[in-house]
Amino acid sequence: MFPLPKTATAPFCPSEVAGSIVIPADLPWWKKALRFAGPGLLVSVGYMDPGNWATDIEAGSRFGYRLLFVVLLSSLAAIVLQCLAARLGIATGKDLAKLSAERYPKALGRIQWVLAEISIISCDLAEVLGSALAFKLLFGVSLPVGVALTALDTFLVLGLQGRGFRRVEAIILGLVGTIGICFVVQLFLIGPDWSAVAAGFVPSLHALSSKEPLYLAIGILGATIMPHNLYLHSSVVQTRAVSGEGGKLAAIRLTRLDTIVSLSLALLINAAILIVAAGAFHSTGRTDVADIGDAYELLTPIAGTTIAAAAFAIGLFASGQSSTFTGTIAGQVIMDGFLQMKIPCWQRRLITRGLAIVPAFIGVVMLGDKAIGQLLVASQVVLSLQLPFAMYPLIRFTDDRSLMKGFANTRLVSWFAWFLFVVISAANLWLVAQVFGLA
């Protein structure tokens, strides 16, 4: 469709740079760990996108710190699934999309591809809305203009042509660091009740005893685990060159460390969003804040300084932009794996962003500022629908000893993974039923 020119250098697509980062065998373990750091950070971006902001802000505003344990448990589930995805890529040398295309009937593979593409577009819709709102908050432009400006990030992707995968990882680290610093500033200015924060991390069935907090809890769960991140992680881990059983085993261990550290950072940022909302709004009686724009407007009078609101807007912008890169890479992985089709990353970015801008633009023109919250929730519902279709083959493949050899799941890991599949599928179905009035 769009052939990759022979003279073009790969920008940062993992399918083009597999094994490009060499890990010498004589390196000290800590230097090896640094070489393996990066893929976990890329996938962690999906766990702190504007969709997560929307659910965390509403949860903190309405129920204070009581749902912090949901953020914690959802993040732990994400760590397990991402570790399985990384293990699959390292053990087989193939990503989840390629294996699905090879081992399932062609028609089923096409369905999986369509569902994966829908999840990327839905996630990109949240990024468009978050970035458009950030443009409005920072520069005072209208939402339609903000949506139009989000198309410019294609030039950022084009500018990275030939820069190398490690460079992109460094940029993502800078953007994630920006988000983290912004929320550290807000936490300092808001001054939450830290004893109540600690209590909120303790799992409580009582906190979910009524319909409203249960609905939000499932929304947090659905927004936390992104299906296309499973495809992405199984591919980007292959940018590190490893060989032999011993090399693969070491790679799996170091990648697991990278995943745990990176997703723990995402957990802290998501928890910080909820804590800021709880400390700023719930504690002051504003339990009705369910919109990102409202949260920004109210932070200044509550915190007593414009710094909190400015940090909020900058963090939101960094969140949307960091997800841009990972969405593009995931799109390349999925297209190459299911269709054996490679196109330049900037073209992939343009296609995905174009498909996301259309509903975003229509929504903000017809609904105005209210479109942000409504479309963000809708995008998370769509993501929830796709998740089981990525989880099922991932768990099946990593359970298969003929495929994974000595790296297959242990019985305990397998049981826990299938337990997560059942719980997450049931939770997402319940959420969808609630949203569409079926329950």
Image (spheres, rainbow, N blue to C red):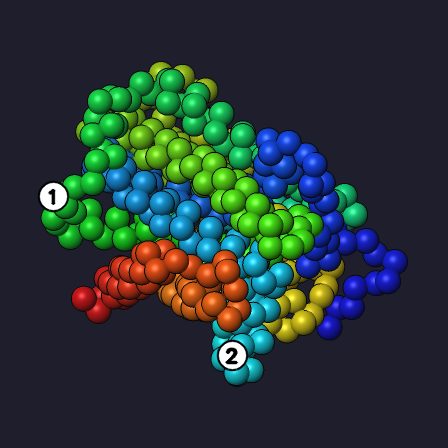
Residue 45 seen anywhere in this rendered image of the structure: no
Q: Nearer the viewer, residue 112 or 254?
A: 254
Picture quarter containing residue 198?
top left
Q: Front-most of 71 and 61?
A: 71
* Label located before the other in sequence (2 or 1): 2
The outermost residue toward the right is 7
The three-letter amino acid code for the residue at tag 1 is His
Q: Secondary structure at mark 1?
A: helix
The residue lying toward the viewer, choosing from 215 and 147, is 215
Which image quadrant for residue 280? Answer: top left
In the picture provided, is 80 more to the left or to the right than 34? Answer: left
Q: Residue 116: horizontal and vertical position, in percent? A: 51, 66
Residue 158 falls left or right of residue 252: right
Left or right: residue 60 compared with residue 122:
left
Say which quadrant the C terminus sits in.
Answer: bottom left
Image quadrant in which the N terminus is located? bottom right
Residue 372 spot, x, y in % from top left: 41, 48
- Please give the residue where the numbered disc 1 appears in the rendered image: 206
The reply to whether residue 318 is visible in this rendering is yes
Query: For the point 16% across and 41% down, which residue is it?
Result: 204
Which residue in the protein does label 2 denote?
104
Q: Nearer the viewer, residue 235 or 426?
A: 235
Q: Measured along the vertical axis of the image, is residue 264 above or below residue 410? A: above
Q: Residue at x 61, y 41 (%)?
A: 36
Secondary structure found at label 2: loop
In this rendering, the answer to whether 355 lies above or below 154 is: below
Q: Going 23% across and 52% down the picture, which residue do you hit? A: 215
Query: In percent of the image, x 20 and y 47: which residue is there?
Result: 213
Q: Distance between the Cα atoms at labels 2 and 1?
A: 43 Å
Residue 66 position within the rendered picture, expressed as x and y whole percent measured from the top left = 21, 36
Residue density around tag 1, few if under 14, some if 14–19, many if 20 or more, within 10 Å? few
Labels 2, 1: front one: 2
